[in-house]
Amino acid sequence: MTPRALILTLTLWSAWSTVPELMETTAEAATVTYQISGTPGFTGAQPVSATAQFTTSTNQIVVVITNNEENPNTDAQTINAIIFNISTTPTSSLTASSTTGSAQDTRTFTKGNTTPTIGSGATTQWATSNSGATLTIGSMSPGTLTRNPHDHTLIGLGLNGGNTYPNANPSIDSSSHSPFLGFTATFTIVVPGVTSATTVTSATFEMGTIAGQDATGVIFVSSPEPPTLALGGIGLASLAAFRALRRGKARVVRPST
């Protein structure tokens, strides 16, 4: 075998030897993150910023929701639910026990006090319901799938990432909507029929303590890449190596003597 042919063989072997690993990784789980940012009309000119990361695997979806808006002014900047569509319709309906979740902490305000009491080991009182391939995960009445967005909404951190909220109005610094969940929460949802090939096709963030204040999310990042794209890239790399060999442009490193 000539040195050039050897280089081509090694190039193709190196590229295609990654295919089984790629396919195995893709089969395990797939992740997509949606985000919102800007100033929706229902917040009274106050900004919102949040992400929701979805990871699909066999019969399971893990959702990590983070409220990135620090030192909010109004409860309309907190998150009470995520409504999302998936490409696979669950094979059975979800129940109140389909979801387990935990938040970073709880934040309980008393009237006129902008520094909340921080609680640990937070239970979310959120659950998941579905209508076909549309899933809603949000604050529910305990043990039921009845929406109850009046407390346990997800609030961002305080001023400069701390625990004080000098910008808070009475919709936050009173006891009417406390406790809030502290800035990030993780939910594991049992969804029969879902696989790693299932995709989250859209996500809507429901804000505030009143149902219907919606902000549509946009895709921020998705991984891993679909196998077809990865294989296409390998194919292009192999073709380039082959053309270089035919044109005599493949570089041969000869051993020193």
Image (tube, grey):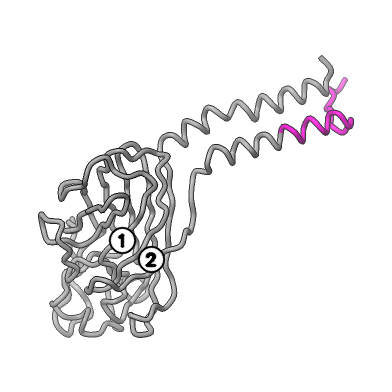
x%, y% of residue 76?
Answer: 29, 76
Give the number of the mark in front: 1 or 2.
Answer: 1
The amino acid at mark 1 is Ile
Give, as a single range, the part of the protein colored magenta: 238-257
Residue 46 vertical placement versus 128 (above, below): below
The amino acid at mark 2 is Ala
**Residue for badge 2:** 50
Left or right: where 38 falls relative to 4:
left
Q: Residues within 10 Å of mark 1 (few under 14, many from 20)?
A: many
Q: Mark 1 near mark 2, Cβ–Cβ under 8 Å?
A: no
The residue located at (47%, 58%) in the rendering is 219
Q: Is 138 covered by the magenta stretch?
A: no
x%, y% of residue 131?
Answer: 26, 53
x%, y% of residue 109?
Answer: 17, 75
The residue located at (34%, 62%) in the rendering is 66
**Residue for badge 1:** 82
Q: Quadrant of the N terminus?
A: top right
Q: Quadrant of residue 80?
A: bottom left
Residue that lies at the very extreme toward the front in this rendered image:
132
Q: Earlier in the sequence, mark 1 or mark 2?
A: 2
- Asked whether 180 or 226 is in front, the reply is 226
Q: Quadrant of residue 51?
A: bottom left
Left or right: where 32 falls relative to 106:
right
Q: Is 253 covered by the magenta stretch?
A: yes
Residue 168 vertical placement versus 211 (above, below): below
x%, y% of residue 216?
Answer: 40, 66
Left or right: where 241 falls relative to 105:
right
